Amino acid sequence: MKIKKDKPHVSQAKENSFYIKTSNIHRASRAPSLRVALLCSVASLLPTYRDARADVYRTYDLAWSGATLGNDASATGTITLDLTSFDQSPDITSSIQSLDVTVTGASSGNGTWTLADLQMVYWWTASPLDLSTELVGQLTSGGAWGTPSGSSGDFNLFFSTPSSPWGTSPFILSTNGGAGNPLLLTEFAPQMSSIDTAQASYLASTVGSSVRPAFQGGTLTLDQANAGYSQNFTLDNSATNTIDQAGLSSTFSGVISDATPGVAGSLTIANSGTGGSVIFSGANSYTGVTTINVGAGLNLSGSVAGAVADAGTLTLDGGAVGGTVTDSGALSVTANGGSAGSLAGNG
């Protein structure tokens, strides 16, 4: 006997926003041709992805728990999204690049499922979310996102195998095709990436949320005027570790050090825009060369332990360079003074 599966009821609760009611979703036979169906809030999704151009792909950690629903089951997983696709269309089906969910501790329905097993995804949010940080708990016009009341939004997965997890209520995934233990979504958080070469650049504003303060050959691009970053950064021995000031000025007050003691980390200050400067106010201990490209500027009120190769603008504002300053650009010293191990060049 086939079990009839009602179509999810969707009502247009307000202009350009589609609200999903899951009360009449039942487990039933699943059409193999239907891989992913996605319903979303048109009005709220587009402004959500404001950082899409810099973060082409982003992977999020997922977690569900049965603790508040009377059971010991749990689920964890990851989902990778193409944020460029999010920026182009509210239909983000093709933006799901990878997915895995593992259920453990359930009375039935333990196992692992992937994107190949996925049949449908439900997603909506009552207000725009900041995708650069933890989504669960962010306030919307309908309350905290992740609250199972159904007023703040929904995120649910529906897999195609009989024993797989199945969404049964807003933010609640139940094991064993919906007949097992209910699990409440507790985490939808971006994985932190190092500043590597996996993408063209990383936004400085995402350091500490989705980006680790660790250079591994990549570029960190300033995206906020007069911002301050207090994190302690590390540099590996890549020759391409770069801060792109992008025409803006920002201060790095933490300590920048070698990622591996005894292995010199180097850093380049570049400028894809016009104007601005990078300000180091901390006592930086990395031992490699700091290169200032043409058009870029470094203001030192703090210090760097190694040498500086300046083809742009180096300003000593009470700061110190432990090694040699090789100057082919502009070197200036403010009334606060400054020092260097030695000076070479003709700048």
Image: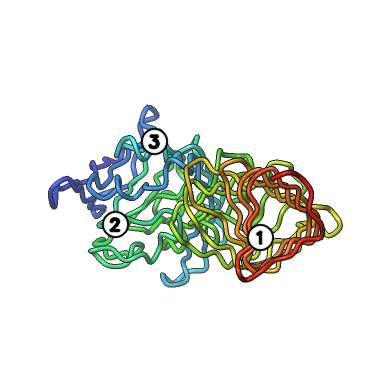
Q: Amino acid at mark 2?
A: Gly
Taking depth in this image into account, of 281 and 264 the one nearest to the observer is 281
Q: Which mark is residue 84?
A: none
Q: Which mark is residue 153?
A: 2
Query: Residue at the spot x=39%, y=52% of the render?
Result: 178
The answer to whether residue 255 of the structure is visible from this angle is yes
Q: Is residue 243 left or right of residue 98?
A: right
User: Which residue is outermost to the right?
Assistant: 262
- Count of marks, rendered view: 3
N-terminal label among 1 and 2:
2
Which secondary structure, mark 3? Answer: helix
Query: Residue at the spot x=20%, y=47% of the render?
Result: 18
N-terminal label among 3 and 1:
3
Q: Which mark is residue 233?
A: 1
Image position, residue 41 (x, y; %): 25, 47
Q: Is residue 34 left or right of residue 12?
A: right
Query: Which quadrant of the rendered structure holds the N terminus?
Result: top left
Q: Amino acid at mark 3?
A: Ser
Q: Amino acid at mark 1?
A: Phe
